[in-house]
Image: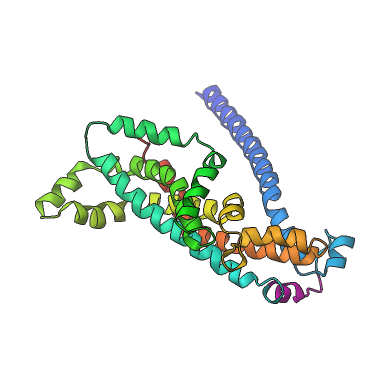
Amino acid sequence: MEPTIVVEHKTQRIKQSRFSLSSAIMYIILTAWSLTTIYPLFWIVNNSFKVSRDVMNNSFGIAWDPVFVNYQNAFDRINIGRSYMNSLIMSFSTVFLVLLLGGLAAYVLSRFNFKGKRAIFSLLYATLLIPAFATVVPVYELLIKTSLVNTYWGLIFPQTAGNLTFATLVIAGYMATIPKELEEAAFMDGCNRWQMFIKIFVPISQPVFASASIFVFMWSYNDLFSALIFVNKENVRPIVALLNEISSQYGTDFGLMATAVSLTVIPVLIVYLFISKYIQKGLTEGAVKG
């Protein structure tokens, strides 16, 4: 009995040492990877509190004596507040339309059986393979004919169409996992299809709606390619297009550029912090079914 106990203790110690070593290596790798993401953000924010001369001479030094002139110039000199509002209006409108239309389409595709359902899923998957720049010319001609160029809707509609397929497939996969017993119980209580969607499927699907919303918001908010083509006037110019103007008009003012980039990142971080707890749950629960 005693030799067996000794062997078990030795085996347990070996496993613990291996576990400790593997855990240490894992934490070292994760820490190094996180620094590659965190440090560039810190570098940008830190340089936003320096004048352009200090950024050029000592860009990696910490701003122990911060100055706020760059933030004042951002709002007075380049009117970044207006571009902020333009970006938020267009991005949140895109998110709302994508979740509304994508949620309704996902509900139909996940809870109804009809002819052509597989063909619709195949078509949706196929549209994901089409690059955005391949549709620029026909979309731009359509916007010109409808007088939507250089308006909010001129960017909201293309971005909604571009993100709708992704949201529909993700939400449909999640809704397909909802038990049919809930649906049958709602029918017994007298709910129609619209009431069932609003009162049952939307509340239960909050995690996947949150996951889709953060991705759609980030893609819409950071879409420089569409912004430069569809809304290039100052009164409707989003903040990502403003950054392009700063690099060309105020290319030597690196402090102002760092400030504009810092202000651009803030909305994405705020939105992520509010709904981050739903993202992993929404993406991991439920696989896309066709």
Quadrant of the frame with the C terminus = top left
- Which is nearer the eye, 153 or 142? 142
Residue 285 in view, yes or no: no
Percent x, y for residue 252? 83, 62
15 to the left or right of 156: right
Report the front residue among 263 and 4.
263
| Picture quadrant of residue 137 | top right
Which residue, as the protein is rendered here, is positioned at the far front? 145
Instruction: Please report the bounds of the magenta region as a residue range.
Output: 64-74
- Judge whether 239 appears above or below 5 on screen: below
Q: Is residue 72 magenta?
A: yes
Q: Position of residue 149 (x, y in %)?
A: 52, 58
Q: Is residue 193 above or below residue 24?
A: below
- On the question of residue 114 being in view, the answer is yes
Q: Residue at x 75, y 72 (%)?
A: 70
Colouring of the image = rainbow
Q: Is residue 224 above or below residue 137?
A: below
Q: Is residue 189 left or right of residue 279?
A: left
Q: Residue at x 37, y 36 (%)?
A: 288
Residue under the point 81% across and 65% down: 253
Task: Answer with the quarter of the image where residue 194 lies.
Answer: bottom left
Is residue 31 shown in magenta?
no
Q: Nearer the viewer, residue 104 or 135?
A: 135
Please name the residue shown 50% across and 54% down the image.
Answer: 144
Q: How many marks?
A: 0
Q: Nearer the viewer, residue 177 or 106?
A: 106
User: In the orientation shown, which residue stands out farthest toward the right?
Assistant: 57
* Residue 125: x %, y % from top left: 42, 34
| Residue 79: image location, x then y, percent | 65, 72
